[in-house]
Every structure is written in C-alpha cells, then in structure tokens.
Image (cartoon, rainbow, N blue to C red):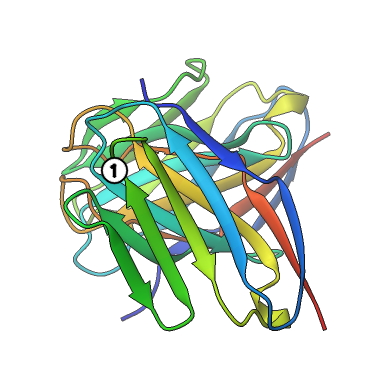
Amino acid sequence: KAGVTQTPRYLIKTRGQQVTLSCSPISGHRSVSWYQQTPGQGLQFLFEYFSETQRNKGNFPGRFSGRQFSNSRSEMNVSTLELGDSALYLCATKPGASTDTQYFGPGTRLTVL
Amino acid sequence: GENVEQHPSTLSVQEGDSAVIKCTYSDSASNYFPWYKQELGKGPQLIIDIRSNVGEKKDQRIAVTLNKTAKHFSLHITETQPEDSAVYFCAAPDGSSNTGKLIFGQGTTLQVKP
C-alpha cells in the first residue's frame, strides 16, 4: 500500500498571502488529522476530518481551515500568512473514527518571508 | 485536556547500550499510547504503541511499558545502533476514546555514538 502523500513538499510564501496544502491518505483510511510542528511548540493538533466532517479542532486562529473530500483527500488552508506560521505541516491518517494507529505523511515545509 | 510530559529532552548513549525515554500523562481515561520516531526531513514514523489493557509490549529491540496507576509509560531500546539516532515522541489521545487528536510530548533527541 502506498503511504500518506502530502503536496507540495516545500513552499515559500510572503506575509499576507494564503496557502493550500494537500494530503492524500492511505487507501481505505477515512480519517485525516493535521498537525503543525515547530521547534518551539513541538507537534500541535490543528484539526481532524472524518467522512468530510470536522470532528475536532485545536487551538489555532480562524485563519487555519480545512476540508475533506468524498475520496478522503484533505486540504488545509492558511490565510493572511504570518511569519510565525513557518512550520512543518503534517497530516496523519487512520482507517476509522476510533482512537487507532495514525500514520504520518512526510509533511509540507512552509516558510513565510 | 490531556497533558504529556517527556524526559529527557536529549539522550546520548554508546552503541550497544540501552536507552530509556519516559512520558507521563494527566488524563486517567487515556487508553492508547503510541511512540513515533522522526528522522531529519521526514514525518514521524510509528515504531510501537500500547493500549491500556496491556502492561508491556515488545517488538524486537523495542519495548514499551505502561503504568496506569502512576500514569506513565516508557520506551526501551536495547542494543542501540547508530541508525536509532533520531527524535522520539510519545503521545496520548485527548478527550474521549473516539478521537484522532493526539497530544505529543516535547520529543527526545537520541544520539547513538559508534
């Protein structure tokens, strides 16, 4: 089985711009969670989607949003980028809604200048 | 919500020695505890996990122990090798058992010296 795919792998944006990141889950996985990883804050949960519905949301401002499509692929969007949004954005997928093993993708490295 | 503390933040061992990383959690309802290994430039890779109805789980050179009473769990790596050098994260679910939200420890950078 192919693993979790994230595109693009690297992005450079400037302050004020917006960005969209994509995550394709392992085949058969219907739950997608997004995490932000920074040296200072570590791994922080952004949100979780299951069957196209947001089930959980972390403590991030409304500039961070996401969605999930009927094929379980997910996108996250960050609007009005700030310097502090520079981070590695990771998605993790699992088969169902219950607490279960999550598999991470390679991440998208976002740099905001 | 759940809070996870991880120690030590850095660990340096000689090849062949054992390494132990410890985590504590706050929510007694947590029932699933994964460990991830992250190498430079890659996403976290699950190496082992344990559920609360089990006290210990082993997979070759890696083992995890869980003490529910004390609310802590530990990763044990025996016969360490240079390729074990990486950042290791523990995690626990936040909220009910029906969630994908994991709370992570701050990570332990393990260096295995040849």
Is B99 situated left or right of A58 in this image?
left
Q: Nearer the viewer, residue A62 or A44?
A: A44
Residue that label 1 marks: A68
Where B14 sits versus A111, above or below?
below
x and y percent of residue B83 in the render?
A: 68, 80
Name the quadrant containing residue A84.
Answer: top right
Q: Position of residue A78 (x, y in %)?
A: 55, 30
* B96, B15: nearer the viewer: B15
Q: Residue B41 at x, y = what percent?
A: 69, 64
- The foreground one among B113 and A31 is B113
**Does residue A52 appear anywhere in the picture?**
yes
Determine whether, in the image, residue A86 is placed left or right of residue A27. right
Eyeballing the image, is B59 above or below B90? below
Left or right relative to A33: residue A76: right
Q: Is residue A8 visible?
A: no
Dot 1 alpha-carbon crowd within 10 angstroms: few under 14, some 14 to 19, many 20 or more: many
- Disc 1, SS: strand
Between B106 and B100, the one lying in front of the other is B106
What amino acid type is highlighted by mark number 1? Gln
Where residue B95 sits in the image (x, y, percent)?
Answer: 26, 27
Identify the residue at horizontal 47%, vertical 53% (top origin): B74
User: How many dots with numbers?
Assistant: 1
Q: Residue at x 27, y 47 (%)?
A: B32
Most distant residue in the top direction: A61
Q: Chain of mark 1?
A: A
| Vertical relation: B8 (above or below) B13 | above
